[in-house]
Amino acid sequence: MKIDRRKFIQRILVAAAAIEAIFLIKGSVSKTSTSRKKTNLFNAGKADSFENNKLYPFLTGQFFLKRYEDGGFLAMSIKCTHLGCVVNTNAKTGGFNCPCHASQFNKFGEVLAAPATRPLDTFPITIENGELFIDTSKPTRRTSFNKSQLTYA
Ligand code: FES
């Protein structure tokens, strides 16, 4: 069988285009899933590196990570639920004070003093291979604290 030069070149170009298309599709799919993971999940580090009954601020992630007396973790937003100011920690109470209009929150993020009317929002925590991942794209509103909000290693 004899193929002329023009048909041979056409077939080579079609084959090259098909291969490139496969790589482009494969690349865009894997980039999407990788970038989604990176943008949504904040790696806070190894769970066993956090001591019980301590608060760890992650200001770049915009959350406080609290490990309570029983080892449970809670990731709370640093933003006041009144108008969104960044709250300060209160070393005396273990809670938080808002510098803008004086709202106060306890160590579980519940309101102690208005004008805020609801607790600090929380973020979902997952643990993979002993490391904590906080999904900062999913703030969760709540009306009070309960133990089901805690995550255990
Ligand atoms: S923004 Fe915090 S009390 Fe107003």
Image: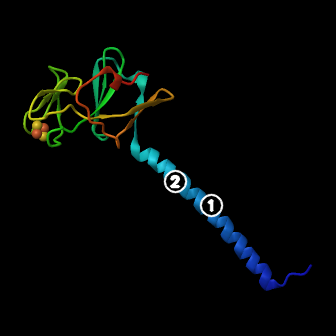
Instruction: Classify mark 2: helix, strand or loop.
Output: helix
Q: CA distance from mark 1 to mark 2?
A: 12 Å
The amino acid beneath tag 2 is: Lys
Residue 111 in the image: state x and y as whole percent. Answer: 15, 28
Crowding at mark 1 (Cα within 10 Å: few <14, some 14-19, many 20+) = few
Question: Which quadrant of the structure image shows residue 126?
Answer: top left
Ligand 1, by image quadrant, is top left
In the image, farthest residue toward the right: 1
Residue beneath label 1, please?
23
Pointer 2 residue Cβ closer than 8 Å to ligand 1: no
The one of 140 and 67 positioned closer to us in this rendering: 140
Residue beneath label 2, please?
31
| Count of residue discs | 2
Label 1 vs 2, first from the N-terminus: 1
- Give the vertical position of 55 relative to 3 (above or below): above
Crowding at mark 2 (Cα within 10 Å: few <14, some 14-19, many 20+) = few
What residue is drawn where x is 75% and y is 74%?
12
In the image, farthest residue toward the top: 70
Q: Quadrant of the C terminus?
A: top left
Question: Which quadrant of the structure image shows residue 22?
Answer: bottom right
Question: Which quadrant of the structure image shows residue 99?
Answer: top left
Q: Tell me if 69 is positioned left or right of 129 in this view.
A: left
